[in-house]
Image (cartoon, rainbow, N blue to C red):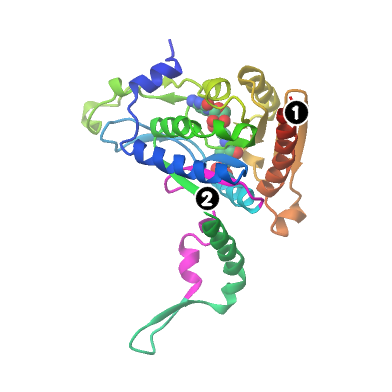
């Protein structure tokens, strides 16, 4: 029998710094509640499932974090406060434009004097400047909070904890669940303490089912919020069916359905009685448009209708 979500939380300890994170999230939410702004909790990146307590090996879920981090930038641009619950070392907003070796190539060193200086190459300024401006604006507005996770268990604890502070926003809170969350895990009680030894032969690893937290999230933790989940499939034939299945099971507002191979150019927004294709053409991609901008613009409109509908009831 798979565990219930309550049993999962009872059996898997929270991250050691959960209380510090709780305070951070609480302060952030309190600050932005006063200003009446909309808030979005974005989850991003994949969760890991450790195979050992002192973890050397783990099973990972597919997600680079591009969807979540690009979306965070666009939500900030349109005035939302953003809590970005992301896999540590996955792609981050703003940094994604200049990360990796590319960043070092953008710099030049002047060692002609005793105190060497480092500056951005003039040929790169046009690329960095708009990103830097947006980053600085986000910093100054203090509307952006990052919370990191690595394991599935930490993710589920942080998600639940963050949800404690969203109900005060009522329908102005949106949850944008883009993280790729494992459906399987090794229970803490069945995990070896130390590294699995190859000399003991090929291990047999039994994975248990993870309870779907979308169920308590929608019905108990944030019942008034605008909840959006993602559905990732590799088979077009089952994509919309699975998205509809999730909507009827969890009763949230929209499932954004995407196929692994085409996720950068096509997402279908599935609602209980409709579906809308969000498509990015080749030409738009060449012009530098990202599908996340189209998704966020669409969701902003839908969120507005939802807020109006909720307040007029
Ligand atoms: O990050 P990128 O590389 O840009 O890729 C983006 C993406 C393809 C990862 C993203 O667009 C996406 O589709 N994310 C969701 C993938 C996924 O894990 O779907 P799922 O079928 O496993 O989960 C569906 C929903 O159930 C999710 O909203 C998840 O939050 C929820 N879930 C999952 C597992 C679990 N134990 N409890 C849950 O509530």
Q: Is residue 59 left or right of residue 272?
A: left
In this view, the residue in front, 258 or 274, is 274
Please indicate, yes or no, whether residue 291 appears anywhere in the rendered image: yes
Which residue, as the protein is rendered here, is positioned at the far top?
A: 1
Asked where in the image residue 11 lies, by quadrant, the reply is top left
Q: Is 20 or 243 nearer to us in this picture?
A: 20
Coordinates of residue 120 in the picture (x, y in percent)? 51, 75
Q: Identify the residue at image location x=75%, y=43%.
A: 279
Q: Which residues are magenta?
A: 78-107
Relative to 28, residue 119 above or below: below
Residue tagged 2: 144
The mark lying in front, picked from 2 and 1, is 1
Mark 2 touches mark 1? (CB < 8 Å): no
Q: Which residue is located at x 31 percent, y 24 percent?
A: 188
Q: Quadrant of ligand 1?
A: top right
Residue 41 locus on image (x, y percent): 55, 39
In percent of width and height, residue 183 lies at 48, 25
Residue located at (59% from left, 35% from top): 169
Tell me the SS state at disc 2.
Answer: strand
Q: What label sits on residue 312 in the rendered view?
A: 1
What is the spatial separation of the Cα atoms under label 2 and label 1, in whole angstroms? 30 Å
State whether residue 86 is above or below residue 118: above
Q: Quadrant of residue 150?
A: top left
């Amino acid at each position: 029998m798979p565990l219930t979500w309550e049993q999962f939380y009872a059996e898997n300890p929270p991250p050691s710094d959960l209380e510090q994170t709780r305070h951070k999230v609480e302060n952030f939410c309190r600050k932005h509640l006063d200003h009446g702004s909309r808030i979005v909790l974005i989850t991003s990146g994949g969760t890991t499932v450790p195979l050992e307590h002192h973890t050397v090996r783990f099973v990972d879920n597919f997600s680079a974090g591009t969807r979540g981090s690009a979306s965070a930038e666009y939500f900030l641009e349109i005035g939302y406060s953003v809590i970005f619950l992301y896999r540590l070392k996955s792609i981050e907003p703003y940094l994604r434009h200049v990360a990796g070796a590319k960043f070092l190539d953008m710099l030049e060193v002047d060692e002609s004097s005793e105190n060497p200086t480092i500056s951005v190459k003039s040929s790169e300024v046009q690329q960095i400047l708009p990103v830097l401006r947006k980053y600085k604006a986000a910093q100054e507005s203090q509307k952006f909070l990052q919370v990191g996770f690595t394991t599935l268990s930490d993710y589920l604890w942080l998600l639940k904890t963050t949800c404690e502070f969203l109900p005060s926003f009522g329908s102005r809170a949106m949850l944008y669940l883009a993280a790729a969350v494992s459906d399987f895990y090794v229970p803490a009680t069945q995990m070896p303490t130390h590294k699995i030894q190859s000399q003991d032969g090929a291990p047999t690893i039994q994975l248990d089912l993870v309870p779907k937290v979308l169920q308590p999230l929608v019905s108990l933790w944030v019942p008034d919020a605008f909840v959006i989940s993602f559905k990732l499939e590799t088979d077009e034939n089952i994509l919309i069916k699975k998205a509809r299945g999730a909507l009827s099971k969890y009763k949230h507002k929209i499932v954004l359905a995407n196929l692994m191979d085409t996720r950068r150019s096509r997402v279908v927004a599935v609602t209980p009685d409709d579906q809308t294709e969000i498509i990015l053409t080749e030409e738009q991609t060449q012009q530098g448009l990202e599908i996340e901008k189209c998704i966020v613009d669409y969701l902003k409109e839908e969120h507005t209708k939802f807020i109006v509908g909720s307040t007029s009831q």
